[in-house]
Amino acid sequence: YATYTTNTETDRCLVVLPGRSEALEKYAEVVYDLDNGALNGEFKYFLMDHRGQGSSGRMLLDSEKGHVDSFNNYVLDLKEFMDTVVKNENCTEVSLLAHSLGAGIATKFLQTYPNYFKRAAFSSPMLKIQTEPYKYVVARAVVLANMAVGRGDFYGTGQGPFNPNRNFETNKFTTSRVRFDMTMDIFEKYTQVKLGGVTNQWLNEVMHSTVKMRLNYKKIKIPLRVFHAGIELYSEPSEMIRLCEETSDCIRTYLPTAKHEVLMDRDVNRGVVIS
């Protein structure tokens, strides 16, 4: 994890949770822009690498496999982080900014532990994964079949090791060439954060755990802001809409020309989210 502040006297805190495969270093620009904008010096920032990615411990000997034994471990890790790191800063209020997988983890966390955060902002929350070109029910059946024959630690169908030769034109996460290059540079500079595709076990845990999550959106009682992209190829957009409809205090912002990582997109889209 990492902490950052330009004002040690502030008692307002912001927790930042990255998406799948992302390292916290990727959010340096986000923290910089927030801390130098209208909220100058207002926050202490807390960023955490989820287990199995970034600079946190990997779950398998093959460090490029995205893997988790239980989705609930993500939630328990966040609770541990809140109880042992954030709590020590004596924050009078704690806000949350979470992206994709981080927002999926945050959704389960808010449903389970409702008193930790005062407000939250989600970008492209992973409430149900997209499985194209397969229908979701087909993809679920394939994952269950792989689990049944003991292939939990194997890459899921269509997944594979880290690809150092990814190019901007075919990427699915940003319309910003500069921020695409920035992400690739982070993988080059911090080689330990490289991560490939996900295992069958990861897929099984996410598919299984998000079912119950989707039945309990109403349990989230704090003010919520949801941002979602028009060119979305990872998270299911209909669930983002439903999340906002079923929670008690939610504002949803749709960015038709953005890709999945709205906080890493072109300024025309990203600026809306930052502001």
Image (cartoon, rainbow, N blue to C red):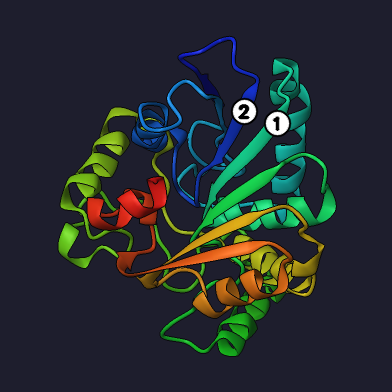
Q: Can the viewer see residue 27 in this picture?
A: yes
Instruction: Answer yes or no: is residue 51 visible.
Output: no
Residue 33, position as x, y percentages in the image:
35, 33
Q: Amino acid at mark 1?
A: Glu
The residue under the point 54% across, 71% down is 129
The circle drawn on residue 93 is 1
Q: In terms of image quadrants, where is residue 144? A: bottom right
Dots 2, 1 in contact, CB < 8 A:
yes
Residue 13's tag is: 2
Amino acid, disc 2: Cys
Dot 1: what SS?
Answer: strand
Residue 135, placed above or below residue 5: below
Closer-to-camera residue (186/120): 120
Compared to residue 183, the image places residue 10 above or below, namely: above
Residue 197 x, y percent position in the rendering: 44, 58
Q: Where residue 49 sits in the image (x, y, percent)?
A: 55, 36
Whichever of labels 2 and 1 marks the residue nearer the N terminus, that label is: 2
Q: CA distance from mark 2 to mark 1?
A: 6 Å
